[in-house]
Image (cartoon, rainbow, N blue to C red):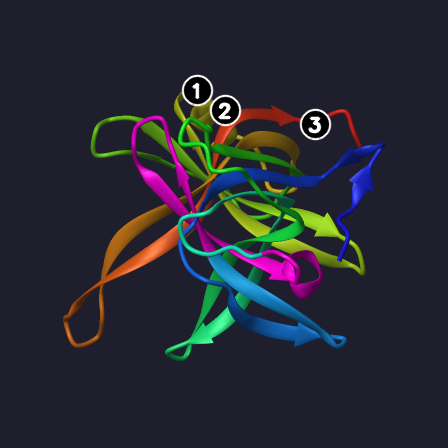
């Protein structure tokens, strides 16, 4: 389950510190190894709390006693997978933990949310303007990992980065740093009911096109 490296640098890295929101529950088993899912709350400086889904192996937590309210540090990777829901495919975005540490209880401890990715633009970037008039660009980034697999990670750029990204062609290799965020939105079902759903994406703080690289 290790991620790919490129010229000594990881192409997919997540460093998170936050508060456990839900107890770990069994997610799935693979090759005899059990994986658990839990929700991690990460506070922004604005006061908003992103709630991110974490997948962690039993090997990393079997000897740890923790639960909702405890602060943990996770080092891992952003992973995506498709799940059929109501007859349609839903893209799930999670952080797969490679290291999992329980932190000392300290209310002054700052939360951390740092994502670094190197991948290829796999769909035409979609530029738009927010209701507040801010320029936005949606990017779907394909990040390779071992065993000929790829994660397709939704990203969003803002301001100057959005204007720049909206003109990049499909296939462009880019490097980004940012944070993983959760965002609620409303969707109407076929019966006309309004449902509140959650989208997960990487909010880009820094973007660079690696034009001269193979």
Mark identifier at residue 210 = 3
What span is colored magenta in the figure?
39-64
Does 51 appear in magenta? Answer: yes
Q: In percent of the image, x 68 and y 55: which residue is there?
A: 150
Q: Secondary structure at mark 3?
A: loop
Q: Residue at x 71, y 39 (%)?
A: 11
> Where is mark 1, residue-wise?
160
Query: How many marks overall?
Result: 3
Residue 47: image quadrant is top left
The residue that appears at 81% across and 60% down in the rendered structure is: 147
Q: Of label 1 and label 3, which has the lower sequence position?
A: 1
List the single residue furthest toward the left: 192
Q: Are marks 3 and 2 in contact (CB under 8 Å)?
A: no
What is the secondary structure assignment of the residue under circle 2?
Answer: helix
| Residue 82 rendering spot, x and y as whole percentages | 53, 67
Q: Please, is residue 52 above or below residue 133 in the view?
A: below
In which quadrant is the C terminus drawn? top right
Q: Label 3 to label 2, Cα distance in Å? A: 13 Å
Q: In the rendered view of the protein, which quadrant contains the N terminus? A: bottom right
Q: Are marks 2 and 1 in contact (CB under 8 Å)?
A: yes
* Residue located beneath label 2 in the image: 164
Give percent across and percent down for residue 95: 57, 51
Taking the image as shown, residue 122 lies to the left or right of residue 163, namely right
Residue 19 highlighted magenta (yes or no): no
Between discs 3 and 2, the one toward the N terminus? 2
Disc 1 to disc 3, how far (Cα)?
17 Å
Q: Residue 136 location, x and y as percent?
A: 37, 32
Q: Position of residue 152 (x, y in %)?
A: 59, 53
Q: Tell me whether circle 1 and circle 3 mark residues in contact (CB < 8 Å).
A: no
- 97 relative to 167 in the view: left or right: right
Real-space Cα distance between discs 2 and 1?
A: 6 Å
């Amino acid at each position: 389950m290790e991620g790919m490296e490129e010229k000594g640098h990881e192409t997919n890295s997540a460093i998170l510190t936050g508060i456990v929101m839900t107890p770990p529950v069994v997610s799935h088993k693979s090759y005899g190894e059990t994986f658990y899912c839990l929700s991690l709350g990460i506070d922004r400086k604005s006061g908003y709390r992103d709630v991110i889904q974490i997948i962690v192996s039993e090997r990393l937590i079997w000897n740890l006693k923790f639960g909702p309210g405890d602060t943990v540090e996770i080092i891992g990777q952003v992973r995506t997978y498709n799940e059929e829901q109501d007859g349609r495919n839903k893209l799930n975005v999670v952080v797969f933990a490679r290291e999992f540490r329980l932190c000392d209880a300290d209310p002054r401890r700052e939360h951390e949310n740092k994502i670094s990715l190197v991948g290829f633009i796999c769909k035409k970037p979609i530029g738009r303007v927010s209701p507040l008039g801010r320029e936005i660009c949606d990017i779907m980034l394909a990040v390779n990992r071992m065993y000929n697999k790829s994660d397709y990670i939704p990203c969003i750029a803002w301001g100057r980065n959005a204007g720049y990204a909206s003109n990049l062609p499909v296939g462009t290799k880019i490097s980004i740093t940012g944070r993983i965020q959760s965002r609620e939105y409303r969707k109407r079902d076929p019966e006309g009911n309004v449902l509140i759903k959650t989208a997960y994406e990487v909010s880009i703080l820094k973007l660079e096109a690696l034009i001269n690289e193979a």
